[in-house]
Image: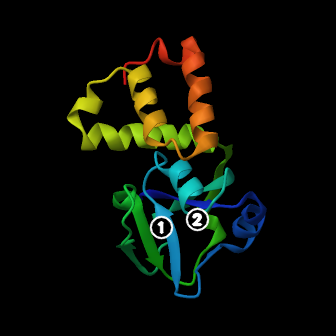
C-alpha cells in the first residue's frame, strides 16, 4: 500500500472525510506522492495559504492512476486517480497547514536558480536573496519582504544554501 496526499481548502475537509474524495467533472481526483510540494501547489495552483492535507491510501483506488501532465517543477509528484470517489475509509486528515507565500516563493526561487545557474548555486544565502531582490524589482511586496529577510541576521547567518 502506498500513501498519496490531496490538498484542499479547510472548508472542504469535513465533507471529504465524511463522504469521500469526489472527482471533478472530468472524472479526475488530484493526488501527490510527497508532502514536499504541498505548500507550493497550495499557493501556485489553488491560491491557498491555509489548507488541509488529506492522506489517501492506494487501497482505495479502483480506477487508473496516471501522471498529471503539468509543466510545473512539481510535475513528477502529481497524479490523477480516474474514478468517481475514493471512499472515506481510505482517507485520513494529516494536518491543517498555514504557509507564508513569500517563504514558499523564496524557497522555490532559490531551488529553481540552483538548478538553472551553477554560479547561483555557489552563492551564499545572503547573496542569493540579493539576487532575488534584484530579479523581482517589479514585485514591491516581495522585495520589501526580502529586505526584511536581509535585515534579520539570524535568518541567513547559519544558512548554507
The residue at the point 37 percent across, 55 percent down is: 73
Check disc 2 and report the residue beneath it.
90
- Dividing the picture into quadrants, the one containing residue 150 is top right
In the displayed image of the protein, which residue is found farthest to the left? 118
Which percent across, then down, holds residue 21? 62, 72
The reply to whether the C-beta atoms of the residues labelled 2 and 1 are less than 8 Å apart is: yes
Which percent across, then down, holds residue 20? 66, 72
- Callout 1 crowding tier (Cα within 10 Å): few <14, some 14–19, many ≥20: few
The residue at the point 42 percent across, 56 percent down is: 33
Check disc 1 and report the residue beneath it.
59
Q: Quadrant of the C terminus?
A: top left
- Is residue 108 or residue 41 the one in the foreground? 108
SS state under label 1: helix
The residue at the point 29 percent across, 32 percent down is: 120
Q: Quadrant of the N terminus?
A: bottom left
Distance (Cα) linking label 2 and label 1: 7 Å
Q: From the viewer's perspective, is residue 118 above or below residue 31?
A: above
Which percent across, then down, holds residue 15? 76, 69
The residue at the point 52 percent across, 56 percent down is: 41
Q: From the viewer's perspective, is residue 82 above or below residue 105?
A: below
- Is residue 23 or residue 129 the one in the foreground? 129
The dot on residue 70 is: none
SS state under label 2: helix
- Is residue 144 or residue 18 the one in the foreground? 144
Amino acid at each position: 500500500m502506498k500513501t498519496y496526499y490531496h490538498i484542499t481548502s479547510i472548508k472542504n475537509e469535513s465533507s471529504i472525510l465524511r463522504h469521500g474524495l469526489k472527482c471533478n467533472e472530468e472524472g479526475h481526483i488530484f493526488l501527490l506522492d510527497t508532502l514536499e510540494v504541498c505548500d507550493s501547489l497550495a499557493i501556485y495552483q489553488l491560491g491557498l495559504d491555509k489548507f488541509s492535507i488529506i492522506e489517501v491510501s492506494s487501497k482505495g483506488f479502483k480506477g487508473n492512476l496516471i501522471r498529471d501532465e503539468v509543466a510545473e517543477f512539481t510535475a513528477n509528484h502529481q497524479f490523477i486517480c480516474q474514478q468517481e470517489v475514493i471512499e472515506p475509509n481510505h482517507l485520513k486528515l494529516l494536518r491543517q497547514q498555514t504557509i507564508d507565500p513569500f517563504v514558499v516563493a523564496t524557497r522555490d526561487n532559490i531551488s529553481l536558480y540552483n538548478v538553472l545557474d551553477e554560479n547561483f548555486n555557489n552563492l551564499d544565502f545572503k547573496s542569493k536573496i540579493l539576487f532575488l531582490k534584484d530579479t523581482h524589482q517589479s514585485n514591491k511586496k516581495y522585495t520589501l519582504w526580502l529586505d526584511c529577510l536581509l535585515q534579520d541576521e539570524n535568518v541567513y547567518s547559519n544558512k548554507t544554501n
